Image (cartoon, grey):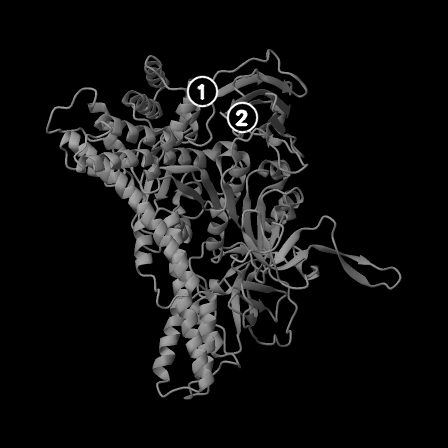
Amino acid sequence: MTVPQRNRLRTGRTVAAGLILGLSLALTGAAAETIILKDGFVIQGNVRKEVTSINDPATGKTFPIAKDTGLDMVDEGPRVVIFSTHAKQLGEVGKDVKLRPEYKAYTIPGGPRKRNDPLPPVMTPRDREAAEFNAKWRRTITVNVPQGFDKIDQQITYLDPYFCYLWSPTHIWRLAYRTSEMDPVMVRRLLSTHPELIEEPGKPDAEKQIAIAKFMLDVGWLQYARDDLERIKKTFTGGLAKNVQESLDKLAKEIDIATAALVVKEADLALSSGRYRYGSELLAAFPDKIAEPKQTDDATKLMAELKSSRERYDSGRRLLRTLLDGLTGKGKANPLLATGGGAAMAAFPSKELPAALSPLVAAGEDVYAELHPDSAQRLEFFVNLAGQVEREVKQGRDPSKRPEELLATAISGWVKGKNGATTDPAIAMRLWAARETVLSFQRADTMNAQSEVLATYKKTNPIKIDELAQVISLLPPAEPENLLFRTGTQVLAKDGTPTGIYKRKTGATTIEAAGIPYYVKLPPEYHHGRAYPVVIALTDAKTDPKNMLALIGSEADRNGYIMIAPEWGNQFGNVQSWQWKGEEHEYVTAVLRDTIRHFCVDNDRVFLMGVADGGNMAMDIGASHPDLFAGVLAVGPTPRWQNMFDWYWKNAQKLPFYVVTGEMSGLSVLNTRRIYEQWTRYGFPGLMVVYKGRGIEWFTAEPPIMFDWMSRKTRVGGAAVLKLNTEARFRWATMRNTDNRFYWLGVEKIADRNLIENSKGGTHIPADIDGDIGGNNIINIHSRGITRISVWLGQEMIDWTKPVGVNINGTSARGWRAKVLEPDIDVLLKDYRERGDRRMLYLQRLEFDAIP
């Protein structure tokens, strides 16, 4: 609210006087350093250790010293990033790591202090648009306060292409912005009034204009820099001094290099997110004449990758189409299927098909419809054989493979992956029947219908369960949305709302019999044949969910994410704020399940992202269901500490958190800090970002950083050992019946005394559980406050040929004797239907009583 910003989510903020994180006492490193985390995420700035102060009795002086338990942080200028040293890479910074250079900065002295007023504890902007800065980079803003209004003087004292620093001559307040958060027009005007850059009236100065254009380029405002460059060329047509012309030529070259770099970066991002048409268009427009050699090399590599991918896809598509047309005479596949929606089209062959061939052809049509460049490698074996047959026919030789063998190769490779391809039609149809059984089971609405599907399949010749798990991992959505005729209601694109948003509703849920409304936006070039990451956007209770989609929409599209945003709070259910109730987790879990049912989701890359109360929602649900998500991002949350994160912080030991807040956000930064004191000490995978002098607001510079952080995250699988890769070991805490699954450990019943609903005030003690599986097939579980435990076993978690033993709290589980377990198809299909998780599959479930 102090610097004009676009797409602001909230206009109010809570502030707290004082320096929350001890930044003014931090010990500064000798020079700016680069921290590279183990996932490759880069933090650059002055590495600091949180400090405290001690008094020297001899001199009576006070000295700052690093706290033994203080937070490790990197001061980037406008923000401080708190991290765990356990997550830091060792060794030198690689040459491919792009570092922020030293920038030219422009400063103005702060001037005399007028007053030392404390900042109001609560304030909101009085005017929709903040006052403009004058030529001395000063302004006065008026804010609403509980007793009326207050006027606050502000002055910009430092501005470089990375950040802007402000202080108040009237109030004890200094704050910082990323320069990219600011209005480019305002920044250009500020620069033009700086003593180093101001021009005399009627005397344009090319050197100063070049400096401003260079600044705009360094911020990342490429088009503004290019516009400035063209303006300079038009203004100074009579020639320039040699040194000025050299500066102009250098600027032009830097703009060209930045243009080429942008094309390469966006093309790379487009191809990695499945946007092949857009990536192809970008590479076709690559400015090779102005690019540097390395940029040309990078673009050439991308072109080669694109060409290889397209050729693989086109070959598979052409050969399969030719094969099907040769058998049926049909000219082309169902256009609905070709765009990824609907069931296989009924065949209208021009000649009679043998009974044994008809199901192969129908399955082949489905494969053709689902084919996508990212999945075309599954047809590699088929392409090789079909290409060989095509050459043989052209040479007048007898084909080495019959059409049904070629179809079998395509179908089996599609269903099970290229290593599962076979020329045997009988095996291929067994695999296809298994796939159709799983999809039918998913679509069955009642338990009786599910039982009937499963009973029918068991009477046939079913494949092995480990093979069935492979089949499930490659399935399309159970009920794929028809992308030509969408269900739900299309949202009108206005007032900043992105195009392509549809409002849908889940089926009946526990908390909402009529279903939960939610918004969904698919990424450009979406196709059901490719699995996409998902970001679940959560607003606060009083904000329209579409606003959140508008804030992150461009980055989600660039990175190829499905965006979903459930309605809750005032929009649905008349809830005023997040209440930390487990039953309300369905606003996320039910919406996620419905999305998985209709769209192709990468279960290993599902993220929660919330703002303000939506941030509380994200942190609560993430910590309560850590096995569902790859990461949690929260902006301006105020996490509950007592009787929530005082215990639940342990549940994030394998779930990365990225929390952003303002230094002056009161309980938001205080409570978040308490959590990170634990997480950073024990090496939990989390980052905390604190903007200096800011409150609870939407930080417009963050989305690109957040999506970069997300791009490096994949959900931790059902590892046999549920502990950190350090000496520390923590149990998973639970105090609500809904918080009942921690990877392969299930909490079926919690003792009444450990449920938060039975708390009588004060500090509540939750139930907890942990476990691991040794190489000797012994499952060791430790629990407290739990009376019934379930254990879910995946393919790689045990040796299925040896007896399995179970110990609970140091003794053999009651009623259990070590025995060899058999994979159970009922367990596999029911759990898959319940959770829709194609990646984390379980083949057996055990259940035990425990002493609470």
> Which kind of residue does numbered mark 1 sit on?
Val
- Give percent across and percent down for residue 600: 36, 37
* Left or right of 481 in this view: 588: right
Q: Going from the N terminus, do you reach mark 2 or mark 1 first?
A: 2
Q: Which residue is pictured at 41% across the width and 88% down the height? A: 202
Q: Is residue 538 above or below residue 445?
A: below
Q: Marks 2 and 1, Cα distance to the nearest angstrom?
A: 16 Å
Task: Give whichever of 74, 167 is nearer the camera.
Answer: 74
Q: Residues within 10 Å of mark 2 (few under 14, many from 20)?
A: some
Q: Which residue is mark 1?
A: 827
In the picture, the quarter occupied by the C terminus is: top right
For residue 4, say whether it is visible.
yes
Q: Which residue is mark 2?
A: 797
- Give percent across and percent down for residue 326: 16, 32
Q: Which residue is pictured at 63% across the width and 30% down the height? A: 766
Task: Give whichever of 300, 454 is nearer the camera.
Answer: 300
Q: Which residue is pictured at 45% across the width and 85% down the height? A: 242
> Which kind of residue does numbered mark 2 sit on?
Met
Name the quadrant containing residue 60. Answer: bottom right
- Give percent across and percent down for residue 621: 51, 37
Q: Is residue 353 above or below residue 298?
A: above
Mark 1: secondary structure: helix
